[in-house]
Image (cartoon, helix red, strand yellow):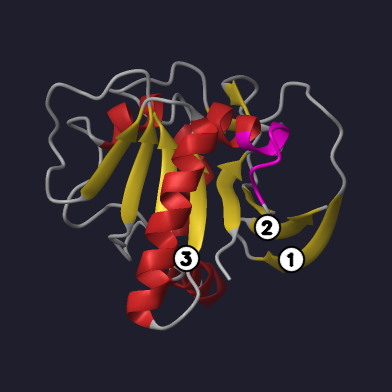
């Protein structure tokens, strides 16, 4: 069964970027510490990244995050979705208007202009089609940014939440949570490494 998994790295004080984030400084000042785990040689970090990338049938991201990964300092053939794993699932971007041009033309991009619920529905269709081709269940992954993940949780679009809790306090930046409806979670797994604590919750 295809599930929708919100998956994002976050600081101890709840930020998914440092201050000053933008296309030329995607993670903001100090924000690279959030993703140290994704580039580490720790076997548990590597396993977590490899398994997450392998089960990604489609990935949803917001326009601001797209502009970062498609920007001159964004993804490359060596470093892309899944960091060193460089996964190539279908990507679905929530945006008010598609870009006039893009750098990452070698990936499968779909731009949805009718809102996040429709983007998740499109991604689910793509993930289910990939599941049929591969003969195994694949997920929809909501990779961010913070506003996209937060909106998905608020709208009840996600089945599970995975947080990679980085051992850093950023002090400012893009918050993951900024109010909203209380929502109970059930912890499914926790894996601690020197670089992050990987927490997965089912959303009730």
- Mark 3 vs mark 2: in front: 3
Among the 4 quarters of the image, the one containing residue 126: bottom left
- Residue 19: x percent and y percent? 51, 18
- The residue located at (53%, 43%) in the rendering is 34
- Residue 63: x percent and y percent? 37, 26
> Which numbered tag is attached to residue 49?
3
Q: Which residue is mark 2?
A: 197
143 drawn magenta: no
Horizontal relation, residue 46 to residue 179: left or right: left
For residue 176, say whether it is visible.
yes
- The residue located at (50%, 53%) in the rendering is 141
Q: Which residue is mark 1?
A: 190
The residues bearing labels 2 and 1 have C-alpha atoms spaced at a distance of: 7 Å
Q: Is residue 107 above or below residue 169?
A: below
Q: Nearer the viewer, residue 20 or 61?
A: 61
Residue interval drawn in magenta = 152-158
Quick check: marks 3 and 1 in contact, CB under 8 Å? no
- Residue 69: x percent and y percent? 29, 37
The residues bearing labels 3 and 2 have C-alpha atoms spaced at a distance of: 13 Å
For residue 39, say whether it is visible.
no
Element on which disc 1 rests: strand
């Amino acid at each position: 069964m295809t599930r929708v998994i919100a998956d994002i790295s976050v600081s101890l004080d709840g930020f998914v970027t440092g201050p000053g984030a933008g296309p030329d400084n995607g993670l903001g000042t100090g924000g690279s510490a959030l993703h140290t785990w994704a580039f580490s040689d720790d076997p548990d970090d590597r396993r977590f990244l490899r398994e997450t990338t392998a089960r990604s049938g489609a990935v949803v991201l917001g326009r601001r995050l797209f502009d970062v990964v498609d920007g001159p300092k964004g993804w490359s053939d060596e470093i892309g979705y899944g960091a060193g794993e460089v996964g190539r699932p279908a990507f679905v971007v929530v945006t008010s208007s598609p870009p006039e041009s893009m750098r990452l033309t070698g990936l499968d991009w779909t731009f949805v202009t009718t809102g996040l619920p429709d983007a998740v529905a499109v991604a689910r269709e793509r993930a289910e089609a990939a599941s049929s081709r591969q003969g195994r269940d694949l997920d929809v992954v909501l990779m961010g940014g913070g506003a996209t993940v937060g909106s998905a949780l608020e709208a009840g679009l996600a089945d599970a939440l995975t947080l990679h809790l980085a051992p850093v306090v950023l002090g400012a930046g893009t918050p993951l949570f900024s109010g909203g409806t209380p929502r109970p979670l059930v912890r499914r797994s926790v894996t601690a490494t020197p670089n992050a604590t990987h927490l997965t919750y089912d959303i009730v």
